[in-house]
Image (cartoon, rainbow, N blue to C red):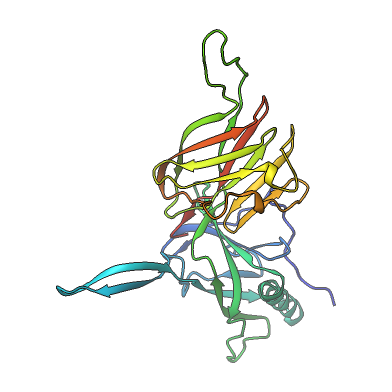
Amino acid sequence: MPLITAPVITPDDPVIPPPIQIPDVGYASITYIDPTGTRWPMTDTSLDWYALADGVSGLGAASYTLTSDPHPRGGARLRHVQAQPRTIVWPVLVKGTNHTTFMDTWRALARAFTRTLREGPGLLEVALPDGRVRRIAVHYSDGWDGRGQHATGITWDSAVVTLWCEDPYWVSTEAVTVHRETGTQVDYLVPFPSVSSSQVLGATDVTNPGDVEVWPTWVITGPASAITFTREDTGDSFTLTMDDTVHGELLTGERVTISTDPPRVRSDTGENLVGGLNWPGAVLWGLPPGTTPVTFQLDGAEIGSAVDLVFYPRHETA
């Protein structure tokens, strides 16, 4: 029996389904992307499956647990704020021209959602009419059950799907990138004492346009012997000394990638270089919303040495 599946659409040329009015969001197009990368348009009512706006919840601001301490003069003082996992509830209608086509589509969608429990999370994508797109990683929790009423389950039925999100924040699909590259070298004494750009790529103001803190990824292109990144407003910094790693100094064109969450350092050949960080003093800092002053410094840099800071803004709501 042939199975009904959604068309595979490459990320480079995604088809955006028609928008519908969604509570807490306004008009938006919704697409579910399963762990295999298959895109399932969820707001195109011309298809045999689509999401229903009535009954949707969980697209607003994240929920938080507040920890407080009693205050001697009455009341309490807030000590800690912890964002909680998000739960999204979304009704989905499935139909078919006959019982066979209905059941094929129903089973295919069930597999698309439940495979997140075995193959990694899927993505729920919200695209606004102005072109902005945000995503959130989701795991199927429950709800793929029919209504169990008379006449359902033959050529149509609906399910109220519950999706669990370990990270409660929505992530923009458009990356923010800051690139700094070493310029032409100068002689320290000619024509007068000067500092070469091979050491300090400069102080930079980095703007996080999101609502919450982000944890950037750094890509360093050699040559370089040591790399230091400093957040000037707090003084937090970390240094990767290449001579303290199995790789040795970074040669021309070689790259190393530093992830701040989770902490991870890899060469472009897959070597684990995390031991080259200046533990225990290393602080792999994040970027709060707004503008943050930072400094990039490369020791042993030459023409072509570069640093790229990359992050995806995170948002409270879809």
Farthest-out residue, top: 191
Residue 175, visible in the rendered structure: no
Q: In which quarter of the view is residue 155 placed?
A: bottom right
Front one among 301 and 67 = 301
Q: In which quarter of the view is residue 242 placed?
A: top right
Q: In which quarter of the view is residue 213 placed?
A: bottom left
State the residue at coordinates (19%, 74%).
Answer: 75
State the residue at coordinates (64%, 75%).
Answer: 94
Is 174 located above or below residue 205 in the figure? below
Q: Residue 81 location, x and y as percent?
A: 37, 67
Q: Residue 99 location, x and y as percent?
A: 73, 82
Please give left or right for residue 68 compared with residue 2 in the image. Answer: left
Q: Residue 141 location, x and y as percent?
A: 59, 79
Q: Residue 129 location, x and y as percent?
A: 50, 50
Front one among 184 and 206 = 184
Farthest-out residue, right: 1
Residue 100, visible in the rendered structure: yes
Please give left or right for residue 2 compared with residue 143 in the image. Answer: right
State the residue at coordinates (46%, 47%).
Answer: 236
Q: Quadrant of the N terminus?
A: bottom right
Front one among 299 and 184 = 299
